[in-house]
Image (cartoon, rainbow, N blue to C red):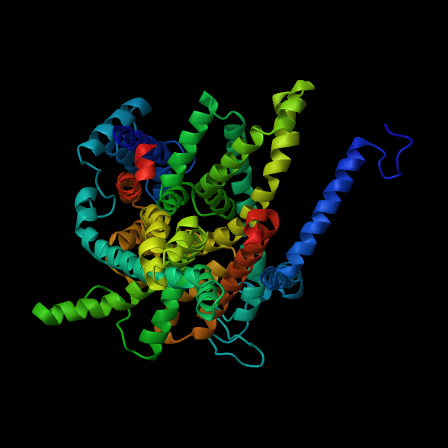
């Protein structure tokens, strides 16, 4: 404990947090300069607002097939700005309510992907060159070559299309690329002197992994997580269109699927088919733009170009 | 090269094992699900289990499965009672036509855009195509297909609403008819993937543009268009080339959705029908087939890459 130093240097821990806050602030300043990133972030915040507030404002009964009271497949009007579906539900309400579960699937699936990918990647990288690495790496490569959609279809068909299963399936089918990126980053961190220094001071594997490897792969993990959310939302849509989406839930993908099943294309019900797809497109595009901007913030090599 | 083939075989072993256990061991038991949807009684279930060999010990089932698969016996479709191998091979051609043409079109156009944009980074062409590529990448293929159907078939009536052909046509008229049906699914698949190739080609062009050998080519007085076509493009093309092959799995995935949307009678539609009818042997076989296709493509990419890039060959 340094008692005679400046006030903010009370302990090693507070020192670390002060440094982290400073880095975060610097990153935010860089991020704010990226127009792309800021546009993406704004759009995302709007949709997250929908996801939180939407279901509170919109009466659940009005988006329930049995209790919806609107006209059947009516084109846009003042009362229903985006028309209605075949149950008489307002498409606008469906899109707003759908934001919640669509984003939930995106975030949780991305989180699961990162969890598996980071665990496998860091462990493989940390034990680089040993049998553990060889085994984990082979496992990762296997999952990397498997065509995700075929695996996702097979898995969902077997375990059944529920909300939780869809999230699990997306995570299981997409962690491999994260693991590979994290592994190669970990391999290079492992060789840096501070790790050896920490080991010389008596740090065990667990401490090294959790206190030194993880914080150092975190930036790369974070920007790939953001891109992963976009991918997960697209995956949910694809599964929904194939009839393997979260059964009974209102998501953008399920709304698209419902309009497809009802024959919206030949019947010309554009107000039903288009809005959920536009929502998906805006959200995935925003996540991608934020992800790219983060990439630039977090990897100096890109920034200089 | 032998090592690579061995690696591919090992991966194939993994795929077989996964394929087997996924359909036997996971909590959602296929026969149980079937029983639920079809209201089968106890005796039917027992018979079905017996027919599928599900009443034997797991190890014995596994041996039977691997032996059967390796000799080309993929079991019987639960719905049509025809051999799965036969069902699949009757659907291969439309998928090869769609995925093949889609891959060629999207790579050629994407690479052209990437070269042009990456060479003059930040130009009007570059910024607009980059935005376009990102937007295309963010659109779910299935929805894009529905959108095109809505516009070109529903409203304008220019193209048929789906299927492979109208039937009872022969000769040139039949070819024209098939092309008419092919146009929209092909457009969907091409638009769905052109963005990715453009982005990747662009970023490898940007990497190459700053290399020393480009500067020295210019210093030697090589004309600008030759610097681009002879010095930059061949080097930038290498990473994209591998990616085209690695991407086959994704294009196949996109094709499943696109075929389902346009009722294009290929493997994808077959899968879609199998999902809706819970025809597990077909789903299982499609997973195997898709994995093998991707494995073969990876192997081809690995081997050709060695020939294209001498640095890899020596390493």
Task: Compare residues B3 and A272 and report the one nearer the observer.
Answer: B3
Task: Compare residues A87 and A188 and report the one nearer the observer.
Answer: A188
Residue A65 appears in the rendering:
no
From what the image shows, is residue B7 above or below residue B159?
Answer: above
Residue A216 location, quadrant: top right
Q: Quadrant of the C terminus of chain A?
A: bottom right
Residue A117: x %, y % from top left: 51, 37
Residue B92 appears in the rendering:
yes
From what the image shows, is residue A149 above or below residue B198?
Answer: above
- Which residue does the image show at 16% across and 45% down from the upper left? B86
Residue A247: x %, y % from top left: 47, 52
**Farthest bottom residue in view:** A78
**Farthest left residue in view:** B171
Residue B173 location, quadrant: bottom left
Residue A149: x %, y % from top left: 38, 47
- Which residue does the image show at 23% across and 68% down from the upper left? B181
Going by the image, does A146 lie left or right of A221? left
Going by the image, does A150 lie left or right of A104? left
**Farthest right residue in view:** A4
Q: Quadrant of the N terminus of chain A?
A: top right
From what the image shows, is residue A185 above or below residue B190?
Answer: above
Task: Compare residues B225 and A228 and report the one nearer the observer.
Answer: B225
- Which residue does the image show at 26% across and 25% down from the upper left? B63
Residue A267: x %, y % from top left: 37, 75
Task: Compare residues B240 and A161 and report the one nearer the observer.
Answer: B240
From what the image shows, is residue B133 above or below residue B6?
Answer: below
Total numbered badges shown on the rendered structure: 0
């Amino acid at each position: 404990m340094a008692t005679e130093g400046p006030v903010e240097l009370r302990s090693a821990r507070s020192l670390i947090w002060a440094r982290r806050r400073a880095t975060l602030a610097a990153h935010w300043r860089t991020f704010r300069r990226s127009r792309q990133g800021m546009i993406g972030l704004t759009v995302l915040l709007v949709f997250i607002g929908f996801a939180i507030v939407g279901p509170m404002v919109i009466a659940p009964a009005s988006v329930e097939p049995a209790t919806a009271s609107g006209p059947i497949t009516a084109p846009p009007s003042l009362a229903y700005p985006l028309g209605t579906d075949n149950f008489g539900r307002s498409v606008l309400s469906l899109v707003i309510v759908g934001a919640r579960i669509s984003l939930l699937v995106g975030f949780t699936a991305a989180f699961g992907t990162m969890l598996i990918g980071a665990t496998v990647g860091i462990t493989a990288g940390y034990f680089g060159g040993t049998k553990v690495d060889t085994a984990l790496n082979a496992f990762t490569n296997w999952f990397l070559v498997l065509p995700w959609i075929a695996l996702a279809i097979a898995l969902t068909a077997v375990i059944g299309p529920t909300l939780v299963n869809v999230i699990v399936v997306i995570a299981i089918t997409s962690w491999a690329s994260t693991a590979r990126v994290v592994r190669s980053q970990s391999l290079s961190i492992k060789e840096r002197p501070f790790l050896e220094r920490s080991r010389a001071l008596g740090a065990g594997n667990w401490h090294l992994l959790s206190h030194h490897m993880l914080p150092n792969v975190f930036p790369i993990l974070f920007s790939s997580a953001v891109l992963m959310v976009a991918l997960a939302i697209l995956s949910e849509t694809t599964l929904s269109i194939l009839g393997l989406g979260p059964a009974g839930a209102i998501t953008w993908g399920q709304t698209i699927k419902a309009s497809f099943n009802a024959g919206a294309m030949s019947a010309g019900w554009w107000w039903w088919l288009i809005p959920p797809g536009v929502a998906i497109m805006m959200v995935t595009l925003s996540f991608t733009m934020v992800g790219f901007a983060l990439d630039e913030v977090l990897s100096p090599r890109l920034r200089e170009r | 090269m032998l090592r690579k083939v061995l690696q591919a075989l090992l991966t194939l072993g993994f795929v077989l094992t996964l394929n087997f256990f996924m359909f036997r061991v996971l909590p959602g038991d296929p026969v149980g699900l079937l029983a639920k949807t079809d209201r089968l009684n106890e005796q039917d279930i027992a018979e079905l289990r017996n027919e599928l060999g599900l009443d034997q010990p797991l190890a014995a089932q596994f041996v039977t499965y691997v032996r059967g698969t390796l000799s080309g016996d993929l079991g019987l479709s639960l719905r049509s009672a025809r051999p799965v191998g036969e069902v699949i091979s009757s659907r291969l051609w439309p998928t090869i036509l769609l995925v093949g043409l889609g891959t060629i079109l999207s790579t050629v156009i994407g690479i052209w855009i990437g070269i042009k944009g990456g060479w003059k980074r930040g130009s009007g062409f570059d910024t607009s195509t980059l935005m376009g590529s990102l937007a295309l990448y963010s659109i779910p293929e299935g929805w894009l297909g529905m959108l095109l159907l809505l516009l070109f078939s529903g409203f304008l009536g220019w193209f048929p609403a789906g299927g492979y052909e109208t039937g009872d046509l022969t000769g040139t008229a039949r070819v024209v008819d098939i092309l008419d049906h092919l146009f929209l699914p092909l457009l969907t698949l091409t638009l769905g993937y052109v963005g990715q190739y453009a982005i990747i080609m662009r970023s490898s062009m940007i990497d190459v543009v700053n290399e020393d050998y480009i500067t020295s080519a210019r210093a030697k007085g090589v004309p600008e268009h030759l610097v681009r076509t002879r010095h930059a493009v061949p080097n930038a093309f290498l990473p994209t080339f591998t990616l085209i092959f690695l991407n086959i799995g994704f294009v196949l995935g996109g094709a499943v959705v696109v075929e389902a949307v346009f009722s294009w009678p290929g493997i994808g539609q077959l899968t879609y029908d199998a999902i809706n009818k819970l025809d597990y042997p077909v789903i299982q076989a499609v997973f195997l087939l898709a994995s093998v296709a991707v494995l073969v493509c990876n192997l081809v990419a690995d081997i050709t890459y060695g020939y294209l890039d001498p640095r890899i060959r020596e390493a």
